[in-house]
Amino acid sequence: MSLTYSRYLALDELLALQRPRSAGPEHDETLFIVIHQVYELWFKQILHELDYLARLFASDAPADGTLPRILHTLKRVLTILKTLVAQVDILETMTPTSFSSFRARLEAASGFQSSQFRELEFLLGMKRPALLAHHRENPAACARLEERLAQATVYQAFLRYLIRRGYAVAEEHLEPRRDAAPIEAPEIRAVLLDVYRHDDRLTQVCERLVDLDEGLQEWRYRHVKMVERTIGSKPGTGGSPGADYLRQTLFKPFFPDLWAIRTEL
């Protein structure tokens, strides 16, 4: 049997994965499912790209060989993030009334349970082991999250990349920590200021990382506003904290050093 477009993409299986639970079903439930499934596919691709980025940072190849791929990989992730933000526009075509028509059918299901988004947070340095409690019913997801807790972050991989380019970074900033949040470090800021003042090529990498951080914050903001206009201040599905919790995640950068140096340049 020859390979076809449908078989290569497993379209029969893919298009059978949208299974509304409401009676009828309610018209907008299909949109709700498709959007969130697409989000998960994009999360998968972002993780794929960031793991590749970490390997590029760790490569012993000459800078001339890795730098274009590093910048290209970051550009791809940034473009995906713009797509994630644009998808909020589609979801916002669903009115509060249309969402409430099938919301009860979601039972305890909540985007708060997205293990891939938790992986993304952990990989970028926002590590909170307590969140594994929301994934106990999925052993495979728990195993992946445990691996992310144990591994170095993308930012730590970047700092090691700076070391290989001749910059002095203390080892204490490079050890993976299971329970950590991104914090500013004066000694790291001093290194980054040196980069910005004397190395235009590495400065490009730093600016792309800032773009990544800003893109994630933009997506968080749009996500909060979408939740507010859809359910207001109600708790999220399954009793999750809803918009109140999501607002607490705003304006918390993954790479605070790269933001802090702006006042010193």
Image: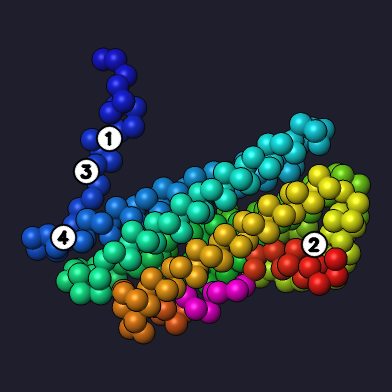
Circle 3 Cα neighbour tier, 10 Å, few/some/many (<14 / 14–19 / ≥20): few
57 relative to 113 in the view: left or right: right
Instruction: Read off the residue under disc 2.
Output: 173
Measured as percent of width and height from the top left, residue 89 is found at 37, 61
Residue 109 visible (yes or no): yes
Q: Residue at x 57, y 59 (%)?
A: 215
Say whether marks 3 and 1 touch (CB < 8 Å).
no
Q: Is residue 35 above or below residue 224?
A: above
Q: CA distance from mark 3 to mark 1?
A: 8 Å
Q: Are marks 3 and 2 in contact (CB under 8 Å)?
A: no
SS of the residue under disc 4: helix
Residue carrying label 3: 16
Three-letter amino acid code at the position of disc 3: Ala
Residue in the picture at 68% in, 42% down:
71
Q: Position of residue 156 (x, y in %)?
A: 74, 55
Give the spatial CA distance, label 2 vs label 4: 51 Å
Q: Residues within 10 Å of mark 4 (few under 14, many from 20)?
A: some
